[in-house]
Image: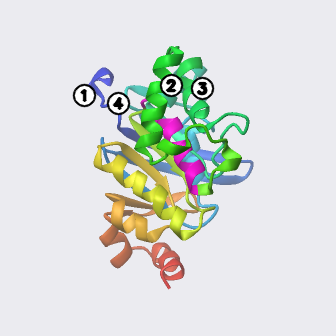
Amino acid sequence: MTVASVPENSVEMHGVTKTYGARTILDGITTRLAPGETVALIGPSGGGKSTLLRCINGLATFDKGHIQVGPHRLQPNAPPAEISLVRRLFGMIFQDFQLFPHLTALENVTEAPVQVRGMNEAEAQEHGKALLARVGLAERVHYYPKELSGGQKQRVAIARALAMEPRGLLCDEITSALDPELKAEVLDVLMDLKAEGMTLIVVTHEIHFARRAADRVLLLAEGRIAEEGPPEKVFESPQTDRAKRFLKTVMA
């Protein structure tokens, strides 16, 4: 398969390694995400999950290996232009929303399409309202972040990422700061996106969501993939001692 023919919603990682001083954060990560696949990244804190997402999106550099996002390849010291192309294919959503507090929900969603993609204001407004309706916020388009609940803020963040028309989303513990009811609101949106064929990589501690939504689970520990496979296999019949120890803790 030539680079030009690689599906834009696929991701491949080959030997991705990242260190901080003497500490190895990612230790030769190699895996592939098929187009439209939903992968849950689980594992102990400090295992490398969030760092791996940030490397895929170009927010963090790495020392060895390469990451193929659609037709674009990230390597150590990747040029900004290549990183920009990757970010257009895969948007990132953060735990702390990162909304602009002085902009309304609609303005948060339309900012990047106008400033980065050059979309005209009227088109961006129409598109932004449609996206906010898509995540259940049609009645909140003119609300400021301080007027929204945590779950609503996270859904604005999802709509903002979708406004750039990505082929996939990288979700970094996006429900960890929410109460159970609000978590359900956000996870339902992700389930809808999965049904539409969006490629999703979700760092999560929500084992129930990983069981229900993920096509595959990667368990990262000490910077390595300790376990990998369908949810039922990983959760019911883990093969490695490291995975067994972690799952015994979170599923007790």
Name the residue: 62% across, 55% down: 149
- With respect to residue 215, does 16 lie above or below? above
CA–CA distance in space, label 3 to label 1: 36 Å
Amino acid at circle 2: Gln
Residue depth check, mark 4 versus mark 2: number of the one nearer the observer: 2
The residue beneath circle 2 is 125
CA–CA distance in space, label 2 to label 3: 10 Å
The residue beneath circle 4 is 8
> Which element is circle 1 on?
loop
Amino acid at circle 3: Glu
Task: Estimate how packed mark 3 is, as few (under 14), some (14 to 19) or many (20 or more) residues with alpha carbons within 10 Å.
Answer: many
* 216 or 176, nearer to the observer: 176
What's the magenta region? Answer: 151-165
Query: Which residue, as the protein is rendered here, is positioned at the far bottom?
Result: 252
Quadrant hosting residue 111 = top right
Q: Percent from the top left, x then y, of residue 90?
A: 46, 35
CA–CA distance in space, label 4 to label 3: 24 Å
The residue beneath circle 3 is 111
Amino acid at circle 1: Met
